[in-house]
Image (cartoon, rainbow, N blue to C red):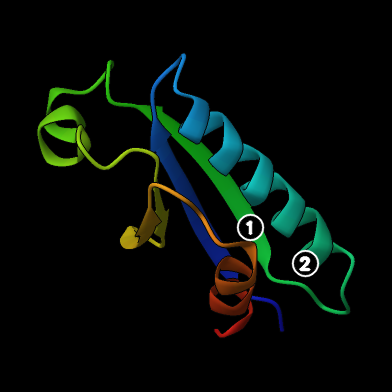
Amino acid sequence: MARDIRLTLIGKPGCHLCDDAREVVTAVMAEIEATDDPPRIELVERSILDDDELRGRYAEEIPVVLIDDVVHNYWRIDPVRLKTALLAG
């Protein structure tokens, strides 16, 4: 049975690394969705400009990708590592 995964991308508008990370995340999600019995992945995007707590915690690390609210990676997102983590469950 497929599991549910909450994938969070933390960044800010105008951040080119954040745009790159979004492309990697959406490409990996599309690859996973094409597999047999894929997990259900909910993508949530949050901006450090809208949340003081996020800004204080991650301002120097964006983009940040969290899997089920646990930091997976930041700055440059490796698609192979992300896909492996998402399918590991």
Q: Quadrant location of residue 56?
A: top left
Quadrant where the C terminus sits is bottom right
Identify which residue, 31 or 78, lies in the foreground.
78
Q: Are marks 2 and 1 in contact (CB under 8 Å)?
A: yes
Q: Quadrant location of residue 28?
A: bottom right
Residue 29 picture location, percent across and down: 72, 56
Quadrant where the N terminus sits is bottom right
Looking at numbered disc 2 in the image, what kind of residue is underneath it?
Ile
Residue 6 picture location, percent across and down: 49, 56
> Looking at the rendered structure, which numbered label has been put on residue 32?
2
Residue 40 picture location, percent across and down: 68, 62
Q: Residues within 10 Å of mark 1 (few under 14, many from 20)?
A: some
Sequence-wise, the earlier of marks 2 and 1 is: 2
Please give the residue where the numbered disc 1 appears in the rendered image.
41
Asked if residue 11 lies left or right of residue 22, the reply is: left
**Label 2, label 1: how many angstroms apart (C-alpha)?**
9 Å
